[in-house]
Every structure is written in C-alpha cells, then in structure tokens.
Image: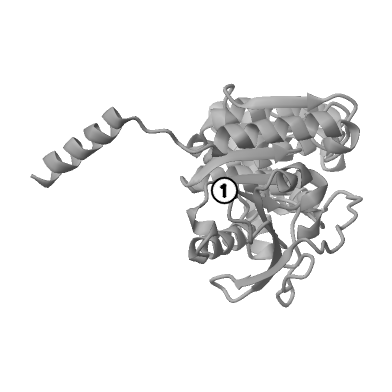
Amino acid sequence: MIWLYAILATVVLILAERILIRRVVVPSVAGILEKAPAFRVVPGRPDPRAQHVSFQTTDGISLTGSLWNGDRQDVQGLILYLPEMDGNHWMAPQYCDALIDDGYAVFSFDFRGQGDSQRPAGFTASHWLTELEMRDISAAMDFIESHPRLSTLPILVFGVSRGGVAALMTGARYPRVRGVIADSAFGTLTMIRFFADRFADLVLPKWLYRLVPGWHVERTLRQAIAHSERRRGYQFVHLEDEAAGLEPDSVLLISGSSDTYVSQDVAGRLHSLVGKAAQHWIAEGARHNMARSVHQAEYDRRIRQHAADCLQPAIISVDAVLRLGKSAVSQAG
C-alpha cells in the first residue's frame, strides 16, 4: 500500500504545482512583463527638409510619417527608419542624418499610438514588439510599393531598441530588404528570460527559483506571455522563431557597453541568434540607444559603410544573364 500512497501524493503535488503556476505565478509574471521600464525618450522635432506622409493600415489605422530626399532623382537606396518605444519619426535624423546627407531617401513613420499617428480606442502600446507594429510596417511596405519612385529603390531597414527588433523582423519577413541596422535591439524571449532571472524574487524566493529547472522556467514564461496576450488582445513577436529568414552578412548590430537595459549578455545572444556573420559593434561607454551620442563619427562611418555595402547596385555579368535566359527558355519548353 505504501507505493499507492506515494503515487497519490505525487499526483496531488503535481496538481497543486500546476494550479499554483496557473493561478498565481503566471499572472504575477505577466504583470511584471507588462510594466515598461522608465524610458527617457525625448521625441524629435519637425524637420523642414522632410515631406509629410500619411497612409492607412489594413485595420483602418491612420499612420503619419515623413520622407527625406523624396524629390531627389539621384538616390541610390531607401532607408526605412523605425523609431523606439515612446519615440517618433522625427527622431530619424538623430540616428541616420549621415545617410540623409549622403543622399539616401529616408522614410519614417510613427507606430500606432505614438507621435502623430492614430491611437485606437483603449490601446496601450507595449515595450515588446507585437503583431500590431508589424501590421503597421506591412502598411509602410505597401506604401513604398505604391510609390512610383520609392518602389524602384533597394531597401535597408534601420531601427532603434524596439524599433531595432522590428527592423530585424522586417528583414526576416520581407525578401526585398537588402540590409538591416539594429541599434540596441534584443530577442524578445531572451530579454524576457533576462528579466525573469533578474526579478524572480518578486514572485518566488531566490533559493527556490534556483531549484527550478531551466525548461520549467521557459515553459512558465511562455504561459505568462500567452496570458498577457489574451489579456491585452495582441500577439507578441519573437525574433527567435523567425531569425532564419535573415541574411546575417546583411545585418549590422550596435550595442553599448554600458547599456543596463540590453545587457552585453543579451546583445551577445542576439548576435548568436542572427548569425556570427553579422557585424556587431559594441560602442564603448554607451548606454541604451546612446552609441551615436558617444561616438558620432564612428557611428556615422559604420552605418554609411553598411548602407553602401547593402544598397550598391547589383552587378550581373553577361554570362549570368545568358544563363538566366537559357533557364527561362528551358522552363518554357
């Protein structure tokens, strides 16, 4: 009979653990995940060099943005700049003014609920990238495709912080994107795990958390994410699930050695996730989003070089053209 009592006791403990996780731990962790850090973002000011742009998403949200160098006939590429959480599209020159000076067309817009774009009723933006922001990017890509001039240009996507995550996701989802620059970006799941390890004592005693297997922590975090998604009505986006769509050698990652939000461990994991062929510049002494403020000349040099490498016109040899022609003929036959 002892073995029977042991089995019953085990079953009771498993059920109690699951109830505790589902009803106490998961809601508590979800609440922590939903609390945005205290970002100190100073929105950019209107720039007279830029042209006003507006367009709509598929769910009817009006988005506002600007276009720099839109009238130039000699532009060699398009930079799609994606601002950080609580930022606005007028911040584009703060990071890519060198690219504007070089004559690239630069297009930026405010995500829904930010800057001059429409805020849906009851909407609260998340500091984690969601499918709603990706829907906004889809509308921006449609705008580009409908524009007689922009639609002919190769695209590099440039983003900062959450906008950097969005830039990487855009590169993974849209084959037309030729390059990505992501400043102070992060993998969402990696970042969430970092916060879980950092603030676990708000939910469990530290000694108990250390005894929890890693796979159990990951499962609980996934449950907390799903709980938050149901409660807030939108889905988080995980670069970890889609990074395979990126071309690593077309990606420039920028991080700050003194960034206390995106730690060097998180930045290093992002580099591994994207691929070691990606460039990763660690700006010495820079805090979150501050690499250009600390090292402007080096920042500008690196983004200029990356844009030139990614957006230069493709050179196709005569032999390659003939091979393509023969292939087309054989397929037609």
Q: Residue at x 56, y 73 (%)?
A: 59
Picture quarter containing residue 188? top right
Residue closest to the eye, 18 or 328 = 328
Q: Residue at x 67, y 47 (%)?
A: 103
- Location of residue 109 in the rendering, given as x and y in whole percent from the top left corner: 70, 61
- Location of residue 170 in the rendering, given as x and y in whole percent from the top left corner: 57, 48
For residue 154, side relative to residue 88 (left or right): left
- Location of residue 175 in the rendering, given as x and y in whole percent from the top left corner: 46, 45
For residue 169, side relative to residue 17 (left or right): left
* Quadrant (top left/top right/bottom left/bottom right) for the N terminus: top right
Callout 1: 10 Å neighbours few (<14), some, many (20+)? many
Q: Residue at x 79, y 32 (%)?
A: 299
Which residue is denoted by mark 1 in the rendering?
170
* Quadrant (top left/top right/bottom left/bottom right) for the C terminus: top left
Residue closest to the eye, 75 or 186 = 75
Q: Residue at x 71, y 63 (%)?
A: 66
